[in-house]
Amino acid sequence: MTKMPMPSAAAPDTKIYERRESAVRTYSRSMPRQFGKAQGVWMHDNAGGRYLDFLSGCSSLNYGHNHPVLKAALVDYIAGDGVTHALDLHTDAKTEFLRTFEDVVLEPRGLDYRMMFTGPTGTNAVEAAIKLARKVTGREMVVAFTNGFHGMTLGALACTGNAGKRGGAGVPLNHVSHEPFDGYYGEGVDTADLLEQRLSDPSSGLDAPAAFLVETVQGEGGLNAASPGWLRKIAALARKHGALLIVDDIQAGCGRTGGFFSFEGMGFTPDIVTLAKSLSGMGLPFALTLIRPDLDIWAPGEHNGTFRGNNHAFVTATAALREFWADSAFADDVARRGGILEGRLERMADRHGLSTRGRGMMRGIDVGSGEIAARITGACFDAGLIIETSGAHDEIVKVLAPLVIDDATLNAGLDILETALAEAIAPVKRPLGVAA
Ligand SMILES: Cc1ncc(COP(=O)(O)O)c(C=O)c1O
């Protein structure tokens, strides 16, 4: 029998958070529970509540919480006094990761990249990517795209579109041109052609770029999925104009859209790729910048960081690669399950005259406003479903279920979403005089 969510009614004591945790906190405001345990697709609060997780640590937990194989590998490693921290020294855990990534990810896909372990957050991988592109080309300007999200440190933030996030910088964010993403002006306007026109016009005011930085599906910016044709044009444009193509696969990679990389099978190869989030497989901080070997012109230590290469994450990431990526079975299953998700979201959207966004297991519904979306996610949470929003106005209800979820549990979570959506979009009209 399918396990169902079981929300708790308890209002936890949040005084310590109000007193001591910074006002910058977000998720805990809309989901005020105290969580203690998590396993697979479930999170448990300290009042006996069981929540189905359709947020997955914002795609950092693609294989679910505490996957038994990954957990066993980590527990064994720690129990055996495996090295935890070693700066960038060679370690057994790193050797295994490098070899496994080469065998399981790079070679089967015919890809040739050097691996640069940056500080452990996605934004650090992006900083490294754009720094390197500037160093290689001797150019300053980066082309990023409308609704792109690349992180919170200044270089990555400059490439991010969202005004609220940019506002936090407190200094000018420059050396980036935000060009229209695929579909920005609606159907019928090819924004890659517009970019080509601007790049080819010596009077357009657009400086020659060091790089194009692009997400294939915009995770925070509204789940806009670029078409393969548009991405191929962008890749060709980058080459033609002497810029490097950086694909930020921090949210869309590691299986979220089906393949290990979100650009697989699209007919182009990025010069640089950034990965983080689900790379460790267990939610451990770990980021990686993949670099075309001839571009790897870093001087030793030129971009460093104390926590480059988290050895515990090497262990769990290696276990995840062996468990999920040694053959195509997992990717095939994700693609199949993405079809279920697509079908259900399409039906919900059709019923209410709405539209869907996304690709693979990275999809959502545009409900038209952040206020309606918040009502929907709030009602979902009250019913035991953890789910969040995305988009310029937080108007997209975003499903990021763990990729390992079984079909019945996926459908159970989508049933909750369907009910919350119907109640928020088309409130039941009661006859006059009948109490609610
Ligand atoms: C596409 C993309 N790039 C970069 C980042 C930044 O990653 P982090 O929050 O680990 O710094 C994110 C985070 O959501 C992301 O979605």
Image (spheres, helix red, strand yellow):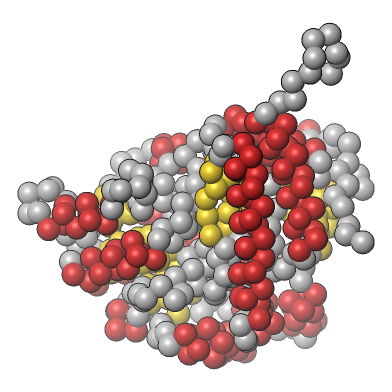
Residue 242 vertical placement versus 94 (above, below): above
Q: Is residue 418 left or right of residue 184?
A: right
Which residue occupies the foreground of this view, 4 or 71? 4
Q: How many marks?
A: 0
- Residue visible at 64% across and 48% down in the picture: 347
Q: Is residue 52 left or right of residue 153?
A: right
Q: Is residue 117 left or right of residue 61?
A: left
Which residue occupies the foreground of this view, 126 or 192? 192
Q: Position of residue 331 (x, y in %)?
A: 61, 75
Quadrant for the N terminus, please: bottom right
Q: Position of residue 22 (x, y in %)?
A: 63, 38
Q: Position of residue 342 (x, y in %)?
A: 61, 56
- Residue visible at 22% across and 56% down in the picture: 193
Image quadrant assignment for residue 326: bottom right
Residue 425 in sight: yes
Which residue occupies the foreground of this view, 281 or 381? 381
What residue occupies the far top of the structure in this picture? 433
Which residue occupies the foreground of this view, 169 or 239? 239
- Residue visible at 79% across and 83% down in the picture: 76
Residue 311 vertical placement versus 350 (above, below): below
- Residue visible at 52% across and 50% down in the picture: 357
What residue occupies the far left of the structure in this picture? 203
Q: Position of residue 365 (x, y in %)?
A: 58, 45
Image quadrant assignment for residue 96: bottom right
Q: Is residue 410 left or right of residue 291?
A: right
